[in-house]
Amino acid sequence: MQHGLLQVLTYGDVGQANWASVSEWMQTENGWNSQHLVGTSPIASRAVMLCRQMEAIHNSLHYSYQNFFQQKNKFSKRVFGSIDQSFSNQQYYLKEYAYFYLQKSTKSSVIVDCSIDILPADKNNVGDLLLFLNQQRSICFCQAEQITVDNLTLQLLNKRYHTAGLFRYRQIYICRQQGEIVGCSIVYR
């Protein structure tokens, strides 16, 4: 049974002994996330990425495509680092991320330092969340992540993952200080 949750694309040029491969997984119902680009040369890496883009352009199920890269890597910075000079900020989102660990509480609301309230996002506060994310990230980010009132936890995508014996869901927490959103946490599992 084909689940369509994971794809591996490979390019090979036997005569030149060049090859490259990239894996990707379904991030949202219509969005993909790629990682683990490997290859023997920049030419092969570029070829597999271009093949991936061509496939996405011709497949209407692909609404967005996300890629992680490190700007300190010369090749990836050269390929992806100039995107802000090529497109409007409504077509791309390019930022460095910092990951951290936070112990999950069993309570639905946690008060931290008696001045910040952390609450789960729901249909009642998703409008405020989207305004905050549009300002702090971009409209493109919200669209690519498909953050909507009906899709906060990725319920439909999780059902697809269940058919393969897996799970994929999202929880979003909003941090408020004196009623104003000062941050949020988007947690994927």
Image (cartoon, rainbow, N blue to C red):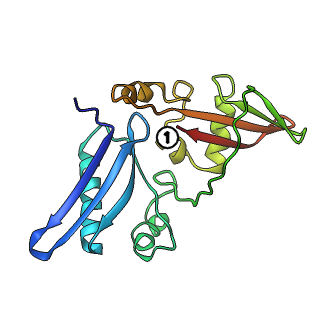
Q: Nearer the viewer, residue 185 or 53?
A: 185
Tell me which corner region of the image, top left, top right, bottom left or bottom right, holds residue 164.
Answer: top left
**Taking 122 as reference, is 144 left or right?**
left
Say which residue label 1 marks.
143
Tell me which corner region of the image, top left, top right, bottom left or bottom right, holds residue 139.
Answer: top right
Tell me which corner region of the image, top left, top right, bottom left or bottom right, holds residue 153.
Answer: top right
**Taking 180 as reference, is 169 left or right?**
left
Residue type of the residue flagged with mark 1: Gln
Vertical placement of 89 versus 83: above or below?
above
Vertical placement of 47 versus 67: above or below?
below
Point 48% across, 57% down: residue: 88
Crowd around label 1: few <14 · some 14–19 · many ≥20 (10 Å): some
Q: Give coordinates of residue 126: x percent, y percent.
A: 64, 30
Point 33% across, 37% down: residue: 5
Q: Nearer the viewer, residue 39 or 151?
A: 39
Q: Determine the secondary structure under disc 1.
A: helix
Q: Number of marks in the image?
A: 1
Point 49% across, 30% down: residue: 154
Q: Which residue is the extreme one toward the left?
A: 15
Q: Give coordinates of residue 105: x percent, y percent.
A: 73, 33
Vertical placement of 82 versus 124: above or below?
below
**Quadrant of the rendering where the N terminus is positioned:** top left
Q: Give coordinates of residue 188: x percent, y percent.
A: 54, 39
Point 44% across, 77% down: residue: 74
Q: Give coordinates of residue 71: x percent, y percent.
A: 51, 70
